[in-house]
Image: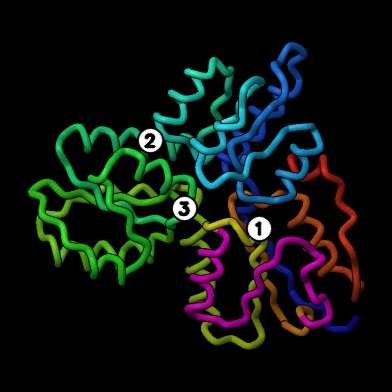
Amino acid sequence: MNNKPNIIKLPIQSFCFGVRNAIKKVNILLEQENIDKPIYMLGDIVHNKYVSEYFKSKDIIVCKESTRLEMLNNIKNGTVIITAHGVSDQVKEKINNLNLPYIDTTCPFVSNSIKLIKKYLSLGYTIIYIGSKNHPESETATSYGNNVILISSLDDAKNIDIHSDKLIITNQTTMSQYDIADIIEYLKNKYPHLETMEKVCSASMERQKMVKDIVLNHINDNNTAFLVIGDKSSHNTKKLADIIKDYNNNVFLTETINDVEITNIKKYKTIYLVSGTSTPKCIIDEICDVLNSDIDSYESQLKLNEYVK
């Protein structure tokens, strides 16, 4: 194909530290000969279905009930894996009461967020928590009682009515810092005594800032497209796409090369490759290689073990 597009893979890509650490811990567990089986995972280890499929192929049972507590109802023996998103104290207590061995792969940023929530609750604060209603982190945060109030949007912020002298706001670690800023600004005007403990993880912040800085140079640029690579259930991946859409409509959210209409995407002069924090490197590399080639059609050749490297 003539006039190949310029493919730019952004410098911060693939797994963040928390995701890489969680996958490493599970792989170490799988190497142990005396581990109690079956092995249960309380939800997806990270929000990427290909990573989950890999662990399923290793005979790990990935539980899908609505809450972590409910997931434990059908587990009587074996080993439990707590995912990178963390769990509440009630879940850990139930695991211990069942005398089940477990490994905890909670991301350090999530663990720190949970510690801060518990600290401020012990000091008598009411906490406004910005998060997605069905996200595991939000499930954990709201498990600590009625003094944690979950909101997901500016409209939610407008509808709450709180009477508390000690009020503080925090958030799900993967929320967009730009969305959070709007909500916090509104709530500070509504509650002048509101304190903040924003806890967006550094990995999400770095990617969000990087993407915004780049797209600001391509506002409504019809010659430039952004390919955001990651699982459609990944909150931080969708947020990257949302940031781009505010300035450029040529945004394509894709999970693998199989979702890319290669001929269509190659019509752009410049294509930026962006990825979420739970996107395997092999998926990004495959897409990059195909777009840099003369191929007009292609199906992924990746093997399951490649998704966790």
Q: Are marks 2 and 1 in contact (CB under 8 Å)?
A: no
Q: What residue is pinned by disc 1?
A: 231
Q: Quadrant of the N terminus?
A: bottom right
119 or 88, which lies in front?
Answer: 88
Q: Earlier in the sequence, mark 2 or mark 1?
A: 2
Q: Is residue 259 magenta?
A: yes
Residue for point 60% across, 41% down: 43
Which residues fall within the magenta stretch? 237-264
Indicate which disc residue 63 carries. Answer: none
Residue 258 locus on image (x, y percent): 82, 66
- Above/below status of 33 relative to 294: above
Q: Which residue is mark 2?
A: 112
Say left or right for 186 vs 55.
Answer: left
In the rendered structure, does residue 222 fall within the stretch colored magenta? no
Horizontal arrangement in the rendering, residue 79 relative to residue 136 (left or right):
right
Q: Amino acid at mark 2?
A: Asn
Residue 91 or residue 169, whichever sits in front: 91
Percent across and percent down for residue 171 are 35, 51
Q: Toward the viewer: 217 or 32?
A: 32
Where in the figure is residue 25, as x and y percent of width and height? 64, 27
Apparent side of residue 282 relative to residue 47 in the rendered image (left or right): right
> Quick one: SS at disc 1?
loop
Identify the element where label 2 is drawn.
helix
Label 3 vs label 1: CA separation? 14 Å
Distance of mark 2 from mark 3, alpha carbons? 13 Å
- Which amino acid is tagged 1? Asp
Where on the picture, by quarter, is residue 223?
A: bottom right
| Residue 273 quadrant | bottom right
Q: Which mark is residue 174?
A: 3
The quadrant of the image that shows the C terminus is: top right
